[in-house]
Image (tube, coloured by chain):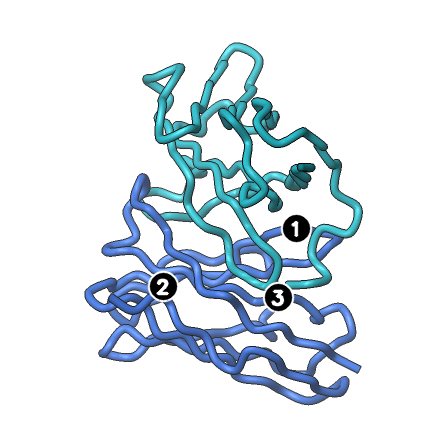
Chain colours: A cyan, B blue
Amino acid sequence: GESVGLHLPTLSVQEGDNSIINCAYSNSASDYFIWYKQESGKGPQFIIDIRSNMDKRQGQRVTVLLNKTVKHLSLQIAATQPGDSAVYFCAEAAKFSGGYNKLIFGAGTRLAVHP
Amino acid sequence: KAGVTQTPRYLIKTRGQQVTLSCSPISGHRSVSWYQQTPGQGLQFLFEYFSETQRNKGNFPGRFSGRQFSNSRSEMNVSTLELGDSALYLCASSLAGSRGEKLFFGSGTQLSVL
């Protein structure tokens, strides 16, 4: 919604540059991580996911890196475009939730792409 | 294939009233989750339903409740509304709600409590 993310950290990049968005997660027992993109007035949209048995996964123009030692997740966007401007959330699947998709979301980072 | 549909898109209520929000999942998806999104608390899990049964619940008071119908459509209800209930309420669906399944979100219902 329009009121979401008023006080989020903002990453400003030039069009064509690479973007790196970072996320620290809290639960060392989490074993599944997802990045979502949320544009104004829309719900979160799945970008890419990674399981804890991997440390890197690549998609189209995006790469997710997982460092379990320091509980850190990052999303790299190559050749950032104006359409990438949005709020980005990392989320972890809480292992204690059993088999069900109870996600714990990070606070989010606003990505602003300038022409 | 239609996405997750939430109605209404916007809602204005006053304190003490109750509200019902509706969610139609993607065809074939049997798991429906609800999340509350606010600027202060971010996205927080409310509950998850599968085959008309609530399987998981977040840390919200009993004023927040939900249900799922046999066609997988879901509703959530908030009774005795408080100012702090103003938020974007998001519904998400997945095939079976298993960990590791992709969640598909609707555009949400923006609730304002006056």
Instruction: Tell me the residue that label 2 is attached to.
Output: B32
- The residue indicated by pointer 1 is B42
The residue lying at 23 percent from left, 68 percent from top is B27
Spatial CA span between label 2 and label 1: 19 Å
Q: Determine whether the residue tagged by mark 2 lies in a helix, strand or loop.
A: strand
Query: Which residue is label 3 attached to?
Result: B88
Q: Please name the amino acid that badge 1 sits on.
A: Gly
Looking at the picture, tell me which residue is in the foreground, A24 or A8: A8
Whichever of callouts 2 and 3 sits on the residue coming sooner in the sequence is: 2
Locate residue A30, reporting x and y percent.
44, 29
Relative to A113, residue B108 above or below: below
Identify which amino acid the numbered label 2 is placed on.
Val
**Crowding near the residue tagged with mark 2, few <14, some 14–19, many ≥20 C-alpha atoms within 10 Å:** many
Residue A73 vs B65, above or below: the answer is above
Q: Residue at the left extreme?
A: B28
Q: Position of residue A6 (x, y in %)?
A: 77, 52
Q: Residue A8: x percent and y percent?
A: 74, 42
> Which quadrant does the C terminus of chain A fall into?
top right
Question: Circle 3: is it few (<14), some (14-19), or many (20+) Cα within 10 Å?
Answer: many
B113 versus B38 height, above or below = below
**Quadrant hosting residue B5:** bottom left
Nearest the viewer among B7 and A102 is B7
Judging from the image, mark 2 belongs to the subunit labelled B
Q: Which mark is residue A114?
A: none
